Amino acid sequence: MLDWLKGKPKEPKEAAPPVDMGANELAGLQTPHYIVDLRDLSEFRKGHLKGAHQIPYMELSKRTHELPTDRLIITVDQSDRRGRQATKLLRSYGFEARNLKGGIGSWTEKLVK
């Protein structure tokens, strides 16, 4: 219990995966994932990542039941701030989640409408 007082090293905790994921990492992702676009519907309709599902940031905590629990959730927003907050929220609910670093503007591939 107090092994650290006796000079025994603490067992390392398993490190959580980083919150952010770069656009290149997402483009090459081979594992099943689910992209959540946090922007409002009008922004989403102007262009979004192929296969993305639109759930506005302000509704996310009420709509987590719509998200799959068996794959990685990728959050995408206009900027990093809300995307990171959404990722942290989803992780607190037990989801495996990461945020697209740099937001939608970092995506270099074609957006769909």
Image (cartoon, rainbow, N blue to C red):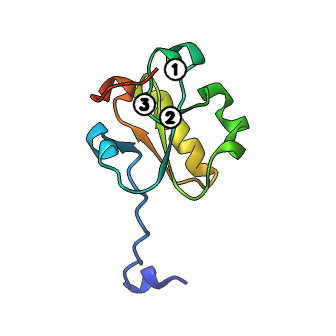
The answer to whether mark 2 and mark 3 are in CB contact below 8 A is yes
Which residue matches tag 3?
49
Q: Secondary structure at mark 2?
A: loop
The answer to whether mark 3 and mark 1 are in CB contact below 8 A is no
Which one is nearer the viewer's eye here, 95 or 26? 26
Separation (CA) of disc 2 from disc 3:
5 Å
Q: Left or right of 59: which side holds 107?
A: left
Q: Secondary structure at mark 3?
A: loop
Question: Outermost residue, front direction?
Answer: 113
Q: Amino acid at mark 2?
A: Ala
Residue 45 image point, x, y percent: 52, 17
Q: Left or right of 24: which side holds 83?
A: right
Quadrant assignment, res 10: bottom left
Q: Which residue is rendered at x = 59% and y = 18% of the image?
A: 41
Which residue matches tag 1?
44
Which residue matches tag 2?
52
Residue 102 image point, x, y percent: 34, 29
Q: Secondary structure at mark 1?
A: helix
Q: Which residue is rendered at x = 26% and y = 41% of the image?
A: 24
